[in-house]
Amino acid sequence: MNEDAKIQVRAQATLDDLLQQRCLMLATVDGEGRPEASTLPFLLHGDEFVVLASELARHTHNLRQQGEAAVLITEDEAECRQPFARQRLQMRCRAQLVTETDQTEVLREGFMDRFGKTVELLTSLPDFRFFTLHQVEAQLVTGFGQAWRLDWPARRLQRITPSGDD
């Protein structure tokens, strides 16, 4: 295997590792353009990221009103050797409230499998809602000078070069 192929394999492994994280960072904007940042547990359901959010939170209001968000998933800080080159997955997403009862139950079960009984309590409260985050654009950073465009949902990586040529 040549060096480029090895780098590609390592980048794919980094992506797989990041998708195993339990929480993502969510950035939204309100109707006035003011930014909000938060963190939420997530579930990868098929090809979509799903979050469970309270209507009491500003980010939930922003998701409902604006329908867009930026998502960041990072490697565990305790495992990061160089914070300037921290491995991360960045995505721009369209957000959609899940309204179908059948889909809500499937997501509830998936969240319970991943996060435990707390999900049962949260989903029994009247203010918690599921949102799907549909990827519009994604980029993976695996280290210094190692950025990749991510074709989702195929999960194909295309290296981004310093000159912008691919």
Image (cartoon, helix red, strand yellow):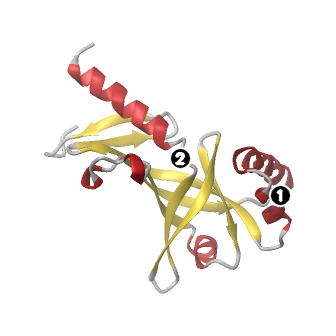
Mark 1 and mark 2 lie on one chain; the one further toward the N terminus is 2
Residue 78: x %, y % from top left:
41, 51
Residue drawn 30% across and 47% down?
A: 81
Residue 85: x %, y % from top left:
27, 50
Q: Mark 1 points at which residue?
A: 120
Q: What residue type is labelled 2?
A: Gln
Mark number, residue 107: none
Residue 119: x %, y % from top left:
77, 57
Residue 162: x %, y % from top left:
15, 45
The outermost residue toward the left is: 163
Q: Distance between the residues labelled 1 and 2?
A: 21 Å
Q: Which amino acid does label 1 sit on?
A: Glu
User: Around disc 2, counting alpha carbons within 10 Å, would you say few (fewer than 14), some (14 to 19), or many (20 or more)?
Assistant: some
Is 12 or 21 nearer to us in this picture?
21
Does residue 138 appear anywhere in the picture? Answer: no
Classify residue 103 as left or right of residue 89: right
- Relative to 38, say whether 155 is above or below: above
Is 59 or 83 nearer to us in this picture?
83
User: To which quarter of the image does residue 15 belong?
Assistant: top left
User: Around disc 1, counting alpha carbons within 10 Å, would you say few (fewer than 14), some (14 to 19), or many (20 or more)?
Assistant: some
Question: Which quadrant of the rendered structure holds the C terminus?
Answer: top left
Q: Name the residue under label 2.
A: 21
Classify residue 74 as left or right of residue 135: left
Question: Which quadrant of the rendered structure holds the N terminus?
Answer: top left
User: To which quarter of the image does residue 13 belong?
Assistant: top left
For label 1, the SS is helix
Residue drawn 78% across and 65% down?
A: 122
For label 2, the SS is loop
Does residue 148 appear anywhere in the picture? Answer: yes
Residue drawn 77% across and 59% down?
A: 118
